[in-house]
Amino acid sequence: MLPTTGHEAEIDQQRQWLSGLLIRYGITDYGTWYYTPMALAFTDHLKPRVTLYDCMDELSAFQGASPQLREQEKQLLQRADLVFTGGHSLFEAKKKLNPSVHAFPSSVDYAHFAKARQGLLDPADQQEIAYPRIGYSGVIDERVDLSLLRELAQRQPTWQFILLGPVVKIDPDTLPQASNLHYLGMKSYDELPAYFSNWEIGMLPFALNESTRFISPTKTPEYLAGGLPVVSTPIRDVVTTYGGCGPVWIADSVLTFEEAIGRMLQNHPKPDWVGIDVQLRQQSWQRTWQAMLGLVEEQLRAKDVDSPDTQPVLSL
């Protein structure tokens, strides 16, 4: 059993491990790429060529967030040469806090999820579930509107609601239970197209609260790439990016969510998938990475250093 340590001792140990790594491998030219401001606690002694903050979520708004997170983020924003945000809402929130903030909304591996359009074999744990099927794929936490799910299941007992993903930070006993609510657990990335292929609709049943105020759900383009129409609560980045898109319906209540699903199931709308696919292909992870890399190279040139493809980069 490892000895227990206080928070300061843990930070000191992490700092020592990291410093030891740099010394061991002779790393002297490097950049730091932060995914969480909390890493600043054990990296504030480093002297990187370039500092990048990849701000994918408003972490301070999440349940159980560290009370030090806001102050650490303030310090990181002051240090960072570049800030990437996981959506337009985050961009609006951060753009005045750093001179070089850039929005990178959710990208998609189009070819991977487009496999769902080919009529893939139904996964074993889904085969006995009746139709119609409305699915959700993602973490099940405080961002999911459990009341919405409960009421939809009660109002439409013949509709089957399938949820893929781990239950995190909330008590599993609080999940609504019904014969038409199916929690199938976490699935691998490779498995997702087969599940999508056997759904009629992809849903984004997010609550409207502080934890969802700045999210940009990756599932929106993934559902669409899989050929699924989407019903979502009015998450700002979903509305901004896809609100005018034919197969994406925005619903702000149980009744409008129910109505949107009902219309899709009854009318089977045929949106302009050609136009949608053009948009999705422009949102590839490859394009996103190339744009990010270009900004990093620009920063390095401004600092009169070599191209970043010859420089070690620490991901923190």
Image (tube, rainbow, N blue to C red):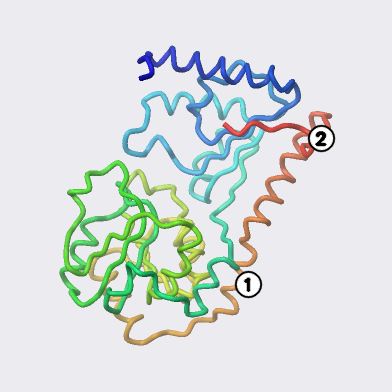
- Type of amino acid at the residue the image marks with label 1: Val
Q: Position of residue 210 (x, y in %)?
A: 34, 44
The single residue placed furthest to the front in the displayed view is 1
Q: Position of residue 270 (x, y in %)?
A: 47, 85
Q: Position of residue 190 (x, y in %)?
A: 50, 61
With respect to residue 137, does 71 lie above or below? above
Q: Earlier in the sequence, mark 2 or mark 1?
A: 1
Q: Secondary structure at mark 1?
A: helix
With respect to residue 231, does 299 lie above or below? above
Relative placement, left or right, of 156 versus 50 is left
Find the distance from the CA under tag 2 to the CA under tag 1: 33 Å
Q: Secondary structure at mark 2?
A: helix
| Residue at the image point whose x is 29% and y is 79% from the top | 131
With respect to residue 49, does 188 lie above or below? below
Crowd tier of the residue under label 1, counting other residues whose Cα lies within 10 Å: few below 14, some 14–19, many 20 or above? few
| Residue at the image point whose x is 80% and y is 35% from the top | 310
Q: Give the quarter of the figure containing the C terminus.
A: top right
Q: Which residue is mark 1?
A: 278
| Residue at the image point whose x is 77% and y is 40% from the top | 297
- Type of amino acid at the residue the image marks with label 2: Arg
- Between residue 290 and residue 242, name the one nearer to us: 290
Q: Position of residue 17 (x, y in %)?
A: 57, 18
Relative placement, left or right, of 225 versus 239 is right
Residue 301: give its label: 2
With respect to residue 91, does 227 lie above or below? below
